[in-house]
Amino acid sequence: MSIVEALLDAVRQEKRAYPGAQVQIVRVRVGALRQIVPDTLKFCFQAATRDTDLAGVLLELDQIPARARCRNCRAEFAVEDNWFQCPHCAAADGELLTGNELDLTSIELRNPPDRLSASV
Amino acid sequence: MNIKVLKNILEANDQVASRIRADLAGRKITAVNLISAPGAGKTSLLEQTIPMLKSHYRIGVLEGDIATTRDADRIGKLGVPVVQLLTGGACHLEAPLVQRGLGELDLTGLNLLFIENVGNIACPAEFDLGENAKVGILSVTEGHDKPAKYPLLFHEVAALVLNKVDLLPYCDFNYDTFLADFRKLNAHAPVFQVSCKTGDGLGDWTHWLEHIAGGEIYVHPHTHTGVAGVQPHTHPHKH
Protein backbone atom coordinates (compact mmCIF):
# COMPACT_ATOMS: atom_id res chain seq x y z
CA MET A 1 0.00 0.00 0.00
CA SER A 2 2.88 2.42 0.71
CA ILE A 3 4.14 1.70 -2.78
CA VAL A 4 0.74 2.57 -4.28
CA GLU A 5 0.64 5.78 -2.25
CA ALA A 6 4.12 6.72 -3.48
CA LEU A 7 3.01 5.90 -7.04
CA LEU A 8 -0.10 8.10 -6.74
CA ASP A 9 2.01 10.97 -5.39
CA ALA A 10 4.27 10.65 -8.44
CA VAL A 11 1.30 10.53 -10.84
CA ARG A 12 -0.34 13.59 -9.26
CA GLN A 13 2.94 15.47 -9.42
CA GLU A 14 3.21 14.80 -13.18
CA LYS A 15 -0.46 15.59 -13.74
CA ARG A 16 -0.10 19.05 -12.20
CA ALA A 17 1.59 20.28 -15.41
CA TYR A 18 -1.58 19.49 -17.38
CA PRO A 19 -4.51 21.22 -15.66
CA GLY A 20 -7.90 19.86 -16.66
CA ALA A 21 -6.49 16.69 -18.20
CA GLN A 22 -7.77 13.31 -17.06
CA VAL A 23 -5.41 10.41 -16.44
CA GLN A 24 -6.48 7.28 -18.30
CA ILE A 25 -3.60 4.86 -17.95
CA VAL A 26 -0.62 4.67 -15.60
CA ARG A 27 2.23 2.41 -16.71
CA VAL A 28 4.66 0.93 -14.20
CA ARG A 29 7.72 -1.23 -14.75
CA VAL A 30 8.33 -3.86 -12.05
CA GLY A 31 11.48 -5.98 -11.82
CA ALA A 32 11.10 -9.67 -11.03
CA LEU A 33 13.08 -9.35 -7.81
CA ARG A 34 10.72 -6.75 -6.38
CA GLN A 35 8.34 -8.43 -4.01
CA ILE A 36 5.34 -7.07 -5.87
CA VAL A 37 2.33 -9.27 -6.51
CA PRO A 38 0.75 -7.76 -9.65
CA ASP A 39 -2.87 -8.51 -8.66
CA THR A 40 -2.32 -7.14 -5.17
CA LEU A 41 -0.77 -3.96 -6.57
CA LYS A 42 -3.73 -3.52 -8.92
CA PHE A 43 -6.19 -4.19 -6.12
CA CYS A 44 -4.49 -1.63 -3.85
CA PHE A 45 -4.34 0.85 -6.72
CA GLN A 46 -8.09 0.49 -7.25
CA ALA A 47 -8.83 0.82 -3.54
CA ALA A 48 -6.61 3.88 -3.13
CA THR A 49 -8.04 5.73 -6.14
CA ARG A 50 -11.73 5.05 -5.48
CA ASP A 51 -13.66 8.33 -5.08
CA THR A 52 -10.58 10.40 -5.91
CA ASP A 53 -9.45 12.41 -8.94
CA LEU A 54 -7.78 9.20 -10.21
CA ALA A 55 -10.82 6.91 -9.90
CA GLY A 56 -11.15 4.47 -12.79
CA VAL A 57 -7.56 4.89 -14.00
CA LEU A 58 -6.09 1.74 -15.52
CA LEU A 59 -2.79 0.48 -14.08
CA GLU A 60 -0.60 -1.38 -16.59
CA LEU A 61 2.36 -3.39 -15.31
CA ASP A 62 5.38 -4.26 -17.39
CA GLN A 63 7.30 -7.07 -15.73
CA ILE A 64 11.07 -7.11 -16.23
CA PRO A 65 12.92 -10.41 -15.86
CA ALA A 66 15.98 -10.54 -13.61
CA ARG A 67 19.40 -10.87 -15.24
CA ALA A 68 22.82 -10.87 -13.67
CA ARG A 69 26.47 -10.85 -14.70
CA CYS A 70 28.85 -13.25 -12.97
CA ARG A 71 31.66 -11.41 -11.20
CA ASN A 72 33.86 -14.47 -11.62
CA CYS A 73 33.54 -15.42 -15.34
CA ARG A 74 31.65 -12.30 -16.58
CA ALA A 75 28.91 -14.43 -18.20
CA GLU A 76 25.40 -12.98 -18.29
CA PHE A 77 22.59 -15.18 -17.10
CA ALA A 78 18.90 -15.15 -16.19
CA VAL A 79 18.30 -15.12 -12.45
CA GLU A 80 15.88 -18.00 -12.13
CA ASP A 81 13.98 -18.62 -8.94
CA ASN A 82 15.99 -15.67 -7.66
CA TRP A 83 19.26 -17.53 -7.43
CA PHE A 84 22.42 -15.62 -8.18
CA GLN A 85 24.47 -18.69 -8.93
CA CYS A 86 26.17 -18.58 -12.34
CA PRO A 87 25.07 -21.50 -14.56
CA HIS A 88 28.47 -21.46 -16.34
CA CYS A 89 31.04 -21.45 -13.53
CA ALA A 90 28.77 -22.06 -10.47
CA ALA A 91 30.11 -19.02 -8.62
CA ALA A 92 27.33 -17.47 -6.54
CA ASP A 93 28.41 -13.90 -7.09
CA GLY A 94 26.11 -12.34 -9.64
CA GLU A 95 25.87 -8.60 -10.15
CA LEU A 96 22.28 -7.63 -10.86
CA LEU A 97 21.73 -6.06 -14.31
CA THR A 98 17.93 -5.93 -14.44
CA GLY A 99 15.12 -7.06 -12.14
CA ASN A 100 15.24 -4.40 -9.46
CA GLU A 101 13.04 -1.83 -11.25
CA LEU A 102 10.08 -0.13 -9.65
CA ASP A 103 9.45 2.80 -11.98
CA LEU A 104 6.58 4.92 -13.19
CA THR A 105 7.29 4.89 -16.94
CA SER A 106 4.42 6.79 -18.57
CA ILE A 107 0.98 8.30 -18.13
CA GLU A 108 -1.79 8.42 -20.73
CA LEU A 109 -3.83 11.63 -20.58
CA ARG A 110 -7.16 12.65 -22.14
CA ASN A 111 -8.09 16.29 -22.82
CA PRO A 112 -4.72 17.86 -22.18
CA PRO A 113 -5.05 21.66 -22.22
CA ASP A 114 -4.16 23.15 -25.62
CA ARG A 115 -1.85 25.86 -24.42
CA LEU A 116 0.40 23.35 -22.63
CA SER A 117 0.17 20.47 -25.07
CA ALA A 118 2.04 22.54 -27.68
CA SER A 119 5.10 22.66 -25.48
CA VAL A 120 5.37 18.89 -24.89
CA MET B 1 -1.53 11.93 -25.07
CA ASN B 2 1.22 9.80 -23.68
CA ILE B 3 3.68 11.37 -21.23
CA LYS B 4 6.97 9.57 -20.69
CA VAL B 5 8.07 9.85 -17.08
CA LEU B 6 10.60 7.21 -15.95
CA LYS B 7 10.71 7.88 -12.27
CA ASN B 8 11.59 5.51 -9.45
CA ILE B 9 8.43 5.16 -7.39
CA LEU B 10 10.40 5.00 -4.15
CA GLU B 11 12.50 8.02 -5.13
CA ALA B 12 11.05 10.18 -2.34
CA ASN B 13 12.03 7.55 0.24
CA ASP B 14 15.45 7.02 -1.31
CA GLN B 15 16.22 10.75 -1.34
CA VAL B 16 15.53 11.01 2.39
CA ALA B 17 17.60 7.84 2.94
CA SER B 18 20.54 9.42 1.08
CA ARG B 19 20.33 12.51 3.26
CA ILE B 20 20.30 10.34 6.41
CA ARG B 21 23.32 8.39 5.13
CA ALA B 22 25.27 11.59 4.43
CA ASP B 23 24.32 13.10 7.79
CA LEU B 24 25.34 9.99 9.74
CA ALA B 25 28.60 9.69 7.77
CA GLY B 26 29.39 13.31 8.67
CA ARG B 27 28.89 12.44 12.32
CA LYS B 28 30.88 9.20 11.98
CA ILE B 29 27.91 7.12 13.09
CA THR B 30 27.49 3.60 11.74
CA ALA B 31 23.84 2.62 11.30
CA VAL B 32 22.68 -1.00 11.31
CA ASN B 33 19.16 -1.86 10.12
CA LEU B 34 18.01 -5.05 11.90
CA ILE B 35 15.40 -7.02 9.96
CA SER B 36 13.66 -10.25 10.95
CA ALA B 37 10.28 -11.90 11.31
CA PRO B 38 8.34 -11.17 14.51
CA GLY B 39 9.81 -13.14 17.40
CA ALA B 40 13.14 -14.04 15.75
CA GLY B 41 14.97 -12.08 18.44
CA LYS B 42 15.79 -8.56 17.25
CA THR B 43 15.19 -6.98 20.64
CA SER B 44 16.79 -9.90 22.50
CA LEU B 45 19.86 -9.58 20.29
CA LEU B 46 20.10 -5.89 21.18
CA GLU B 47 19.64 -6.71 24.87
CA GLN B 48 22.67 -9.01 24.63
CA THR B 49 24.76 -6.88 22.25
CA ILE B 50 24.46 -3.44 23.83
CA PRO B 51 25.95 -4.38 27.24
CA MET B 52 28.89 -6.06 25.43
CA LEU B 53 29.72 -2.91 23.44
CA LYS B 54 28.52 -0.14 25.71
CA SER B 55 31.85 0.52 27.39
CA HIS B 56 33.63 1.18 24.07
CA TYR B 57 30.90 2.63 21.88
CA ARG B 58 28.19 5.21 22.34
CA ILE B 59 25.06 3.51 21.10
CA GLY B 60 21.64 4.82 20.14
CA VAL B 61 18.56 2.82 19.15
CA LEU B 62 15.51 3.53 16.99
CA GLU B 63 12.78 0.98 17.75
CA GLY B 64 10.28 0.39 14.97
CA ASP B 65 6.92 -1.11 15.84
CA ILE B 66 3.35 -0.97 14.62
CA ALA B 67 2.07 -0.25 18.13
CA THR B 68 3.18 -0.10 21.81
CA THR B 69 6.45 1.07 23.37
CA ARG B 70 7.29 -2.35 24.85
CA ASP B 71 10.52 -2.82 22.91
CA ALA B 72 11.70 0.73 23.60
CA ASP B 73 11.00 0.11 27.29
CA ARG B 74 13.19 -3.03 27.19
CA ILE B 75 16.05 -1.17 25.46
CA GLY B 76 15.67 1.89 27.72
CA LYS B 77 16.57 -0.32 30.70
CA LEU B 78 20.04 -0.82 29.18
CA GLY B 79 20.85 2.84 29.73
CA VAL B 80 21.21 3.87 26.07
CA PRO B 81 19.15 6.54 24.31
CA VAL B 82 16.18 5.04 22.48
CA VAL B 83 13.36 6.50 20.42
CA GLN B 84 10.25 4.49 19.61
CA LEU B 85 9.04 4.79 16.00
CA LEU B 86 5.39 3.84 15.64
CA THR B 87 4.29 3.15 12.08
CA GLY B 88 0.59 3.23 12.96
CA GLY B 89 -0.17 0.12 10.94
CA ALA B 90 2.57 -0.02 8.32
CA CYS B 91 4.53 -3.29 8.26
CA HIS B 92 7.96 -1.69 7.69
CA LEU B 93 9.95 1.46 8.42
CA GLU B 94 10.40 4.17 5.79
CA ALA B 95 13.16 6.78 5.65
CA PRO B 96 11.04 9.86 6.59
CA LEU B 97 9.98 8.23 9.88
CA VAL B 98 13.61 7.34 10.62
CA GLN B 99 14.58 10.95 9.90
CA ARG B 100 11.99 12.20 12.38
CA GLY B 101 13.25 9.69 14.93
CA LEU B 102 16.83 10.89 14.48
CA GLY B 103 15.56 14.40 15.23
CA GLU B 104 14.43 13.13 18.63
CA LEU B 105 17.68 11.32 19.42
CA ASP B 106 20.73 13.11 20.80
CA LEU B 107 23.33 12.13 18.21
CA THR B 108 26.23 13.92 19.88
CA GLY B 109 29.15 11.53 20.25
CA LEU B 110 27.25 8.44 19.03
CA ASN B 111 29.27 5.82 17.11
CA LEU B 112 26.71 3.12 16.57
CA LEU B 113 23.01 3.36 15.75
CA PHE B 114 20.73 0.34 15.69
CA ILE B 115 17.47 0.67 13.78
CA GLU B 116 15.15 -2.16 14.73
CA ASN B 117 12.72 -2.60 11.88
CA VAL B 118 9.13 -3.83 12.20
CA GLY B 119 8.95 -7.63 12.43
CA ASN B 120 8.58 -8.71 8.79
CA ILE B 121 11.04 -10.19 6.30
CA ALA B 122 9.36 -9.07 3.07
CA CYS B 123 8.61 -5.32 2.94
CA PRO B 124 11.46 -3.94 5.11
CA ALA B 125 13.94 -5.22 2.52
CA GLU B 126 12.41 -2.83 -0.06
CA PHE B 127 13.00 0.43 1.83
CA ASP B 128 16.41 2.04 2.20
CA LEU B 129 16.66 3.78 5.57
CA GLY B 130 20.10 5.32 5.05
CA GLU B 131 21.79 2.52 6.99
CA ASN B 132 25.37 1.34 6.44
CA ALA B 133 24.41 -2.30 6.74
CA LYS B 134 21.25 -4.37 6.73
CA VAL B 135 21.51 -7.31 9.10
CA GLY B 136 19.04 -10.20 8.88
CA ILE B 137 18.11 -12.29 11.88
CA LEU B 138 16.68 -15.74 11.34
CA SER B 139 15.76 -18.04 14.20
CA VAL B 140 16.12 -21.78 13.71
CA THR B 141 12.49 -22.36 14.69
CA GLU B 142 11.36 -20.53 11.54
CA GLY B 143 12.86 -23.24 9.31
CA HIS B 144 15.78 -23.50 6.88
CA ASP B 145 13.64 -22.64 3.84
CA LYS B 146 13.38 -18.91 4.58
CA PRO B 147 16.24 -17.71 2.31
CA ALA B 148 14.59 -19.50 -0.61
CA LYS B 149 11.17 -18.04 0.25
CA TYR B 150 12.23 -14.46 0.97
CA PRO B 151 15.19 -14.00 -1.40
CA LEU B 152 15.33 -10.21 -1.47
CA LEU B 153 16.17 -9.79 2.21
CA PHE B 154 18.79 -12.54 2.17
CA HIS B 155 20.31 -11.05 -0.98
CA GLU B 156 20.52 -7.60 0.61
CA VAL B 157 21.99 -8.36 4.04
CA ALA B 158 25.60 -7.55 4.94
CA ALA B 159 25.48 -10.16 7.72
CA LEU B 160 23.08 -12.80 8.96
CA VAL B 161 22.53 -13.72 12.59
CA LEU B 162 21.14 -17.23 13.06
CA ASN B 163 19.47 -17.09 16.47
CA LYS B 164 18.16 -19.70 18.92
CA VAL B 165 20.80 -22.26 17.94
CA ASP B 166 20.33 -23.79 21.43
CA LEU B 167 17.03 -25.14 20.02
CA LEU B 168 18.67 -26.91 17.03
CA PRO B 169 18.34 -30.38 18.64
CA TYR B 170 14.59 -29.87 18.98
CA CYS B 171 13.67 -28.66 15.51
CA ASP B 172 14.10 -29.77 11.90
CA PHE B 173 16.33 -26.91 10.84
CA ASN B 174 18.91 -28.24 8.35
CA TYR B 175 21.92 -25.93 8.56
CA ASP B 176 23.58 -27.25 5.39
CA THR B 177 20.45 -26.70 3.28
CA PHE B 178 20.01 -23.25 4.78
CA LEU B 179 23.62 -22.27 4.07
CA ALA B 180 23.61 -23.66 0.52
CA ASP B 181 20.43 -21.68 -0.29
CA PHE B 182 21.77 -18.55 1.40
CA ARG B 183 25.07 -18.72 -0.49
CA LYS B 184 23.25 -18.79 -3.85
CA LEU B 185 21.71 -15.45 -2.89
CA ASN B 186 24.61 -13.90 -1.06
CA ALA B 187 28.17 -15.03 -1.64
CA HIS B 188 29.93 -13.13 1.12
CA ALA B 189 27.79 -12.07 4.09
CA PRO B 190 29.04 -13.74 7.27
CA VAL B 191 26.64 -15.98 9.23
CA PHE B 192 26.79 -15.75 13.03
CA GLN B 193 25.27 -18.68 14.90
CA VAL B 194 24.12 -17.35 18.23
CA SER B 195 21.79 -18.00 21.11
CA CYS B 196 20.53 -14.90 22.87
CA LYS B 197 19.31 -17.27 25.60
CA THR B 198 22.68 -18.85 26.44
CA GLY B 199 24.96 -16.13 25.03
CA ASP B 200 26.69 -18.57 22.67
CA GLY B 201 28.34 -17.10 19.57
CA LEU B 202 27.71 -13.47 20.43
CA GLY B 203 31.43 -12.65 20.54
CA ASP B 204 31.90 -13.15 16.79
CA TRP B 205 28.85 -11.00 16.09
CA THR B 206 29.97 -8.11 18.30
CA HIS B 207 33.46 -8.42 16.83
CA TRP B 208 31.97 -7.89 13.37
CA LEU B 209 30.04 -4.86 14.65
CA GLU B 210 33.28 -3.46 16.03
CA HIS B 211 34.84 -3.90 12.60
CA ILE B 212 32.12 -1.90 10.86
CA ALA B 213 31.67 0.77 13.56
CA GLY B 214 33.27 4.07 12.70
CA GLY B 215 30.77 5.30 10.15
CA GLU B 216 32.97 5.55 7.08
CA ILE B 217 32.44 2.11 5.66
CA TYR B 218 29.43 1.28 3.58
CA VAL B 219 29.08 -2.45 3.97
CA HIS B 220 27.39 -3.78 0.92
CA PRO B 221 27.26 -7.56 0.96
CA HIS B 222 28.51 -7.94 -2.59
CA THR B 223 31.48 -5.64 -2.72
CA HIS B 224 33.60 -6.31 0.31
CA THR B 225 36.46 -8.74 0.52
CA GLY B 226 38.38 -10.61 3.14
CA VAL B 227 37.61 -13.05 5.90
CA ALA B 228 34.03 -13.02 7.18
CA GLY B 229 33.13 -10.15 4.88
CA VAL B 230 35.14 -7.52 6.70
CA GLN B 231 36.58 -4.50 4.95
CA PRO B 232 40.23 -3.60 5.37
CA HIS B 233 40.25 -1.42 8.45
CA THR B 234 42.18 -0.03 11.34
CA HIS B 235 41.58 -1.69 14.66
CA PRO B 236 39.82 0.17 17.44
CA HIS B 237 40.08 -3.04 19.48
CA LYS B 238 42.46 -5.90 20.25
CA HIS B 239 42.24 -9.26 18.55
Image: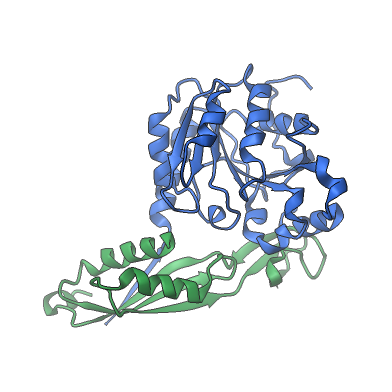
Chain colours: A green, B blue
**Which of B107 and A76 lies nearest the eye of the viewer?**
B107
Q: In which quarter of the image is the C terminus of chain A?
A: bottom left
Could you tell me which residue is drawn at 41 percent across and 43 percent down? B97
Q: Which residue lies furthest to the top in this view?
A: B55
Count the marks: 0
Could you tell me which residue is drawn at 75 percent across and 32 percent down? B202
Task: Residue A71: name its quadrant.
Answer: bottom right
- Relative to B224, residue A11 above or below: below
Give the side of residue B235 with respect to residue B200, left or right.
left
Give the side of residue B163 with respect to residue B101, left or right.
right
**Which of A20 and B104 lies nearest the eye of the viewer?**
B104
| Residue B99 place in picture, x, y as percent | 40, 39
| Residue B206 place in picture, x, y as percent | 71, 30
Kindly tell me whether residue A78 is visible in this rendering. no
- Relative to B210, residue B182 above or below: below
| Residue B126 place in picture, x, y as percent | 53, 56
| Residue B165 place in picture, x, y as percent | 80, 42
Task: Residue A93: name its quadrant.
Answer: bottom right
Task: Residue B158: name its quadrant.
Answer: top right
**Which of A3 and A10 lies nearest the eye of the viewer?**
A3
**Which of B105 and A98 lies nearest the eye of the viewer?**
B105
Q: Quadrant of the N terminus of chain A?
A: bottom left
- Relative to B172, residue B219 above or below: above
Kindly tell me whether residue B172 is visible in this rendering. yes
